[in-house]
Image (spheres, grey):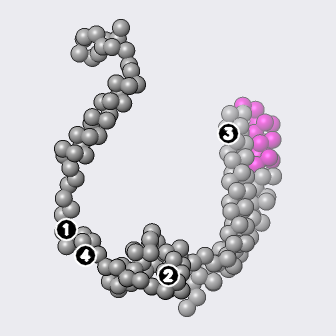
Amino acid sequence: MYFCPYKRPCPPFSLEVAAAELAVTVIYHVLIMGRNKYKKQEDLLSSPVRTRVTEVTYKRLEKLVAESSCQSVGEVARKILSREKLLCFYKDITMNAPMEELARLRKELKSIGININQLVKSFNSAKEETHKAFYILKVMKQYRPVEAKVDRLLVLVSAMAEKWLQK
């Protein structure tokens, strides 16, 4: 026996009862309440336009769907007919290698940073001066490869900037 917040006995939880209550709630919201009316009635797509195109034209439209932010051929056709901008996304494969190297450098710098943070924590918790000197030497050892990696990072970023900021 369970007690509800209303201080009366409640039956044990039943999955069938919960499913039935959910179904009643969904039916109530769908059938009785209905959907809210769209505020801008002039923006609704209410007039159907049907046309036939050749296979070549349909393939071009499908290619535009794949390259753009549109979800269907109909959406592409609507944007073309209404002369809206059709945003197409292209991938520059020449940037794959630099991007992979940037990701690798980021991962290496992150791991070096984690190591340095751990050493600094140990340094701060050390009581003796010899222990602190030991941790200082370890931190210095960790910092040495950072300069070379940052230099490589700057070279990559400047090369990417030259490519992307062309006039």
| Residue type at tag 1 | Lys
Image quarter hosting the C terminus = bottom right
User: Which numbered tag is attached to residue 47?
Assistant: 4
| Residue type at tag 3 | Lys
Q: Residue furthest top?
A: 1
User: Which numbered tag is attached to residue 121?
Assistant: 3
Vertical comparison of 8 with 160: above or below:
above
Circle 2 residues within 10 Å: few <14, some 14–19, many ≥20: few
Left or right, residue 73 beside residue 2: right
- Alpha carbons under labels 4 and 1: distance apart: 15 Å
Q: Earlier in the sequence, mark 4 or mark 1?
A: 1
Q: Secondary structure at mark 2?
A: helix
Front-most of 8 and 96?
8
User: Which numbered tag is attached to residue 58?
Assistant: 2
Q: Secondary structure at mark 3?
A: helix
| Magenta residue check for 35 | no
Which of label 3 and label 1 is nearer to you? 1
Q: Earlier in the sequence, mark 2 or mark 1?
A: 1
Image quarter hosting the N terminus = top left
Q: Earlier in the sequence, mark 2 or mark 3?
A: 2
Q: Earlier in the sequence, mark 4 or mark 2?
A: 4
Q: What main secondary structure does the magenta stretch of the protein show? A: helix
Which of label 3 and label 4 is nearer to you? 4
| Residue type at tag 2 | Tyr
- Alpha carbons under labels 2 and 1: distance apart: 32 Å
User: Where is residue 18, by image quadrant?
Assistant: top left
Which of label 4 and label 1 is nearer to you? 4
Residue 131 position in % (x across, y down): 78, 36
* Residue, disc 1: 40
| Residue type at tag 4 | Ser
- Alpha carbons under labels 3 and 1: distance apart: 60 Å
Residues drawn in magenta: 127-139
